[in-house]
Amino acid sequence: MTSTLSVAPPARRASCARVRRLLPVALALLAVSSACTEARGSAPPTKETAAVGAPASEPAAWDGQKHPKPSEEELRRTLSPLAYNVTQREGTEPAFRNTFWNHHAEGLYVDVVSGEPLFSSKDKFDSGTGWPSFTRPLEAQRVVEKRDATLGMVRVEVRSKDGDSHLGHVFEDGPEPTGLRYCINSASLRFVPVEELAAKGYGAWLPAFGRAAPAAAKAPEAVKETAYLAGGCFWGMEDLLRKIPGVLETEVGYTGGESVFAHPTYEDVHTGKTGHAEAVRIVFNPKLLTYDALLEKWFFRMHDPTTLNRQGNDVGTQYRSAIFYLSEEQRQVAEAVRARVNASGKWKRPVVTTITAASAFTPAEGYHQDYLVKNPGGYTCHYLRD
């Protein structure tokens, strides 16, 4: 995540200009593999030097809860490929092509791995870098800072304390009151709107947003699973999926295409030449909604799984019916459900839904997210069949 803010003194500047002139190929690799490419000149801030959470007049909340890191098996089952690469392999998402860089809603940003609360929207600012930027973490004890000497420079890496997730890096070019810029990957975060804080176990932080804390806030939901489904235009799919009891969050995007289109845009996908499908990422609580039920009771009812590369007026491979599984268990469940639906006699033609292993999922542009919430009465060809 390259800094586009105040220029550091010559002795502390990253030599980006020199590298650009001499090693353009190396620079391109650095831009892809490094979340932040400006070295920070001094030691990491201490709890005393870096004000965190709310201002002194509004002390930060502390719920006293631990947020343990799930097992490797669960991480691979629940995280998107991008989130896994960022949090577990210190990867980097593209600038300006991520979920939260231009996100302005009120609420908390929590660790996508463990649910640990990390940052507040009250401390978020526009750094111009294309990644979410914060002046401070929610609480000093929520993050760990480590020296990072990779890529030929010295930086300060930021990781979550309980989940040990790679988040990004911190720099000394931020605005007041801290002068710091926490440059964070969207893929390492999950956003909890202020309206949902109490219901999802983060009610202790409501006073920071001018709201009363509940008498007893329940613990955050630790059990979750992820599914990737495609069934035509993702606007209508997401609008139905979000309302299912047990669904925690949804996000529309592109997946299942050619590797040469690693970071597709809508302009790429709508041509039908990338192989990517318009899809929805669904995070759900398997104790309330099983993967089997998600497919049989909802997915196969909200679209026509017998029309090849088409839903309603939308025609092309990008509108195909597809299930992208994240584990062997999901594959087996998907194949069993598809067989039952095909044999049920509810459809006059054979089911053509494909079942393939999940690949990288690229979030769609911001205006596509929650489209029918923002545009009530907008186009959709999706509805639940009896």
Image: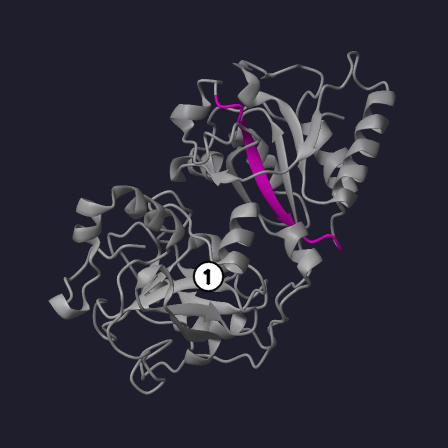
Can residue 108 be found in the magenta stretch? no
Viewport quadrant of the N terminus: bottom left
Front in this rendered view, residue 139 or 5: 5
The spot of residue 224 in percent (x, y) is 67, 55
The type of residue carrying mark 1 is Val
- Per the rendered image, the range of residues in magenta is 274-287
Find residue 169 and report its image quarter. Answer: bottom left
Which residue is rendered at x = 45% and y = 30% of the image?
Answer: 261
39 displayed left or right of 296: left
Give the residue furthest to the left.
10
Q: Secondary structure at mark 1?
A: helix
41 displayed left or right of 294: left
The spot of residue 247 in percent (x, y) is 64, 48
Find residue 220 and report its image quarter. Answer: bottom right
Q: Which residue matches tag 1?
A: 194
What is the crowding at mark 1: few (fewer than 14 residues within 10 Å), some, or many (at least 20)?
some
The spot of residue 327 in percent (x, y) is 72, 45
Find residue 124 and report its image quarter. Answer: bottom left
Which residue is rendered at x = 21% and y = 67% of the image?
Answer: 173
The spot of residue 318 in percent (x, y) is 54, 22
Give the residue furthest to the front.
22
* Res. 384 visible in picture: no
Viewport quadrant of the C terminus: top right
Colouring method of the image? one colour
Can residue 279 be found in the magenta stretch? yes
Front in this rendered view, residue 193 or 307: 307
Which residue is rendered at x = 33% and y = 58% of the image?
Answer: 36
